Every structure is written in structure tokens, then in C-alpha cells.
Amino acid sequence: MCGMSQQPPVRSTAPRSARPDASMSLLTNVMDHSLDDGYAEAAARRGVEGRSGLPRTVRAKLGLAAGLVLAALVVTVGAVQARVDAPALAKEREELIDRVETETAAADALAERVDQLRETVQEMQRKALERHGGDQGERTALLAGATPVKGPGIKLVIDDAEDAGGGDGDGPRQSTGFSDTGRVRDRDMQRVINGLWAAGAEAVSVNGQRLTALSAIRAAGDAILVDNKPLAPPYTILAVGNGREFREDFDDSEDGQYLEVLHENYGVRYTVAVQDEVRLPAAQSLIIRTAEPVKTGKGSTS
């Protein structure tokens, strides 16, 4: 081994002036000064002025007391007034309910009276048709829809397509102003009804409403009106005619083919069935008109 002596390690003899947590000065500052100076001043000021927020002067205390008394007085008066008005309001409400019920009953009675008068007028019209129709009185009443009718015929049910959305293409309804959709339109109904008349129908009804020569089929938005009464799909059409032959004539007609095109192009659904007997009611409203020949010269009429 070498005989050279080893020097001991040199140690610093400087005084320990730095804190062990000197490297964490930010955390140390937060812990030592957790309360902001502004908050500290406010706390000290509250301590000097007193912690109570109540007024300390006699005038302020009297004002506060007067305010509390006034508030209590307003609440008390409101409660008393509400209790006093409650019976009056309840009485007025009961009177209003009684008036509504009375007027409703009166309106129902008037509606019932109108129905009775309407039936009386219709019966007088039917008798007038039968009396003045001569030998053809019964037939005249039948064609005018004045009497109920039953007999063999067909039952035609038409409904909108399952998906009655919009479509495009060259369809049979393109020139009518309607969009090509699967919804049944008033002009479709007009063509079907006219086709039934042309095929030999003696009487026709739609959804239980009897049609006459003066019946009008129109549209109001998406609804179909028959004599100003709205119809809802499916549309059930009953027609009195010569059974199976009647159906074949309708199927072979132009309007019957039109209905088939609506089914193929737009998905309009329909079924036709021959019935041994269908029953149609009388028309709900009739307009009686008479005509007389006008004499244009001696011994001649026009």
C-alpha cells in the first residue's frame, strides 16, 4: 500500500441560514398568508364596528320597527280580505256554472227541435214528390233521394295508400293541379261516383250519405266534402244496381280503369264486392223544384 496519508473530506462550516423548505417558497407563502390582506382589514373593521348588522341609533331602530309593523299589517289585511272575498268568489263561480249548464241544455233542446223540424220538412217533401209525380211518383222520389232504398248492388271501399307521401312522375292526376300522392282526392271521388252512375247505378251513398243529382263533391284542404260535410277515409261507397253485371260494367268503364291506375301508380287501396242487398238511407236535405211549360203562342208551348 502507498504510505501517503489521506486527507479527510472538507466540510462546510458556514452557518445554516436557509430554511429546509426554501425550495417550496410558493407553498410556504400560501400557508403563512392564507387570508388576503383585504379580508383581514374587513374583518378587523367589523370587529371595531360590531358584528351585529342591526341599527344602533334610536331613530334607525324606530324606523325598522315601523317597517316591520307595516309589513305585518299589509299581510294581515290581505289575509282578511281574501277570507272575506272567498265566499263571494265561490258564489259567482257557482252562478257561472249554473248559467253554462242552463245555456247548454237550452242549446241541446234547440238542436233537437231543429232535427225534428228537419225530419218533418223532409217527410213533407217526400209526400209532395210522391203526390205530384203522377204515375212516376215513386221513381221520381227514388231518383231524388227522397226515400230509402234497398236492393242488389256493389260495395266499393277506397282508402289512401299506406304511405301517402309525395311522389313524382307522369300520372293521371298531373293535369288536375294535385300533387301525385297516394291520398284520395275529391276529383278521384267525382270520377268514381260518375263512373258508377254511368254503369247503371240507381242510388249511391258515400259513408252513409245519400247522393242526389244536386250533390256536390269538393275539397277543403286535404278533406273531401260531400254536400259540405267532411268525409274521413276509408270511403265506403254503396251503389244499387244489377249485381254482377253492374260491377263488370263499372270495371270495364274508363272510370273503373282510372281507379285501377290509381292503385298501381300511387298505392291507393280499394276493394269491390257484389252484394245481394245494400241499404241506402234517404238524402238528409232535399230541394224541391217544379217546372211548368211556358206558352209562347196560341195553342203552342215551349
Image: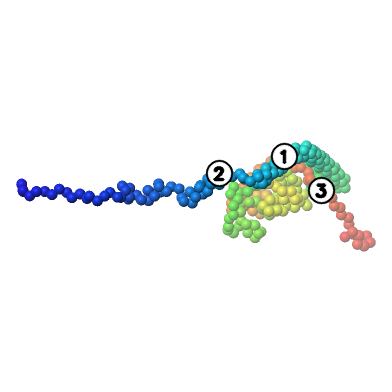
Report crowding for label 3: few under 14, some 14 to 19, many 20 or more residues within 10 A (C-alpha).
Answer: some
| Precedes in sequence: disc 3 or disc 1 | 1
Residue 111: where, in percent of width, then height? 81, 42
| Precedes in sequence: disc 2 or disc 1 | 2
Marks 3 and 1, how far apart at CA: 70 Å
Is residue 107 in view? yes
Residue 166: where, in percent of width, then height? 59, 54
Count all numbered tags in the image, as a single digit.
Answer: 3
| Precedes in sequence: disc 2 or disc 3 | 2
Q: Which residue is mark 1?
A: 76
Q: Amino acid at mark 3?
A: Leu
Report crowding for label 1: few under 14, some 14 to 19, many 20 or more residues within 10 A (C-alpha).
Answer: few
| 234 or 104, nearer to the observer | 104
Residue depicted at x 57% and y 43%:
52
| 214 or 168, nearer to the observer | 168
Q: Which residue is mark 2?
A: 51
SS assignment at label 3: loop
SS assignment at label 1: helix
| 92 or 15, nearer to the observer | 15
